[in-house]
Image: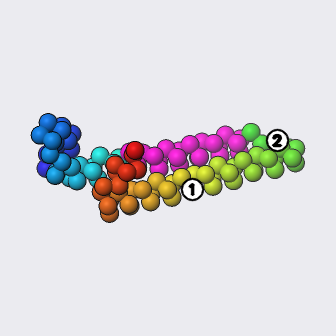
Amino acid sequence: MKHPLTILSKSFIKKEFTKLSEITLFAAMPFALFAVLSDIAIAASLVALLWGNRTGFRRTVTLVNTLIVYAINRCILTSIFAATEIIAVSVIPILVYVTSH
């Protein structure tokens, strides 16, 4: 199998995009996986930071707990959307161009 960038550059030169579906999954998958992993890393570091900065005051602890729940919920929500995008792109490759523009 040829390198995806080679196929893409030759397609632009020849104005022929018949082999473009070959590189769709290979080009989009690393970026989507990186998005999921970075969301998880950001949420984990935010939870660790907030957990370490708890005080003995009841209202502050309640606020920090609420922020922790928001961080976890945001991570779950964005990871679900990124995973859905990965699945959709692998099933229907033309969606790479629709979702990226």
Whether residue 84 can be seen here: yes
The residue sitting at 37% across, 51% down in the picture is 98
Q: Residues within 10 Å of mark 2 (few under 14, many from 20)?
A: few
Q: Is residue 34 above or below residue 94?
A: above
Q: Residues within 10 Å of mark 1 (few under 14, many from 20)?
A: few
Q: Which residue is mark 2?
A: 55
What amino acid does circle 1 point to? Answer: Leu
Q: Position of residue 79 (x, y in %)?
A: 51, 54
Work out whether residue 50 or residue 83 is closer to the camera in this orientation and state it: 83
The residue sitting at 72% across, 47% down in the picture is 67
Instruction: Label 1: state its secondary structure.
Output: helix
Q: Position of residue 45 (x, y in %)?
A: 60, 42
Task: Left or right? Give the position of 1 relative to 63.
Answer: left
Q: Position of residue 4 (x, y in %)?
A: 21, 44
Q: Position of residue 86 (x, y in %)?
A: 39, 56
Work out whether residue 36 or residue 57 is closer to the camera in this orientation and state it: 36
Give the prevailing secondary structure in the magenta stretch. helix
Q: Quadrant of residue 48?
A: top right
The residue sitting at 57% across, 56% down in the picture is 76
Work out whether residue 20 or residue 33 is closer to the camera in this orientation and state it: 20
Q: Which residue is mark 1?
A: 77
Q: Is residue 28 above or below residue 80?
A: above
Does the magenta portion include 10?
no
Task: Left or right? Give the position of 101 relative to 18.
Answer: right
The residue sitting at 53% across, 49% down in the picture is 40
What amino acid does circle 2 point to? Answer: Thr
CB under 8 Å between callouts 1 and 2? no
Stretch in magenta = 31-52
Q: Between disc 1 and disc 2, whose residue precedes?
A: 2
Residue 17's label in the rendered image is none
